[in-house]
Amino acid sequence: MDGKVPIEIGAHVLYNGSIYRISLISVIGIELTTGNNRRLPLNKLKPASAAVPDSREINAIPPGDWRTAEKRYAVIAPLLGRKITKRTDVEQRAREAGINTSTVYRWIKRYKQLGLPALVPRRRGWTLGKHRRGGVLHEIISSIVREYVGSPANNIVQEVTRACNDRGIKPPSAGTVRRRIKRDIETRGATHADV
């Protein structure tokens, strides 16, 4: 025997001097919000619909967002322990909180999937430094802008368009390339002919 234990249904294993046949495989899971552990059968597990935040991400959540999550939890908490939740109860909680009934259902679903961190408000829209186009396009523009320092903007636009077409990527507008050239001038002090 090579020392590996077969962990699969039907496999035979040795435990405390007795031989067992595995009939159900389970793991111990730790519930995110309470810290309680529980035996979970693998054949009944489903993937979480969103990524579970790790502790670094949780620690980065601003206190105001945590307070919002706690307020949302307070709205849904009375509805969580029930096997069957009546629509009238959900509607009543929604009215009391001044929110839409579908929002209460959405919060319940998120909470059941990922716990309290799922109730933290989601940030929407574009933030500084986040690019609307893919990273490949970002790299193409950056490398060409650096390579053609001092060249006329029209030449740089043409070169970016050519490089994108060669890779089968939709090229950015001339204005997008010119803004990147301008940003390059402002941040690195580079010069370009006719931005």
Image (cartoon, grey):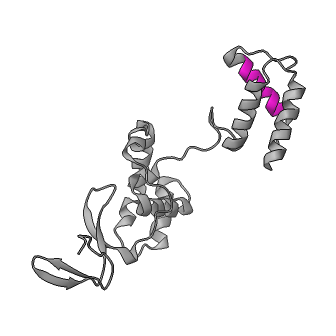
**What is the tally of numbered marks visible in this picture?**
0
Quadrant position of residue 18: bottom left
**Side of 191 where 87 appears, left or right:** left
Identify the residue at horizontal 39%, vertical 65% (top origin).
79
Which is the main secondary structure of the residues drawn in magenta? helix
Q: Position of residue 156 (x, y in %)?
A: 84, 28
Q: Is residue 97 above or below residue 27?
A: above
Q: Residue at x 88, y 18 (%)?
A: 194
Residue lying at 48% horizontally and 55% vertically, measured from the top left: 51
Q: Quadrant of the N terminus?
A: bottom left
Residue 159 shown in magenta: no
- Residue 44, compared with residue 50, is above or below; it is below
x then y, percent, for residue 46: 44, 70
Residue occupying the point 73% across, 41% down: 137
In the image, 188 versus 119, the foreground residue is 188
For residue 170, say whether it is visible: no
Quarter placement of the C terminus: top right
* Residue 49 seen in render: yes
* Residues shaded magenta: 175-185
Q: Is residue 69 left or right of residue 6?
A: right
Does the magenta run of residues contain 178? yes
Q: Nearer the viewer, residue 59 or 88?
A: 59
Image position, residue 131 (x, y; %): 67, 38
Image quadrant where residue 13 sits: bottom left
Q: Residue furthest front?
A: 1
Q: Quadrant of residue 163?
A: top right
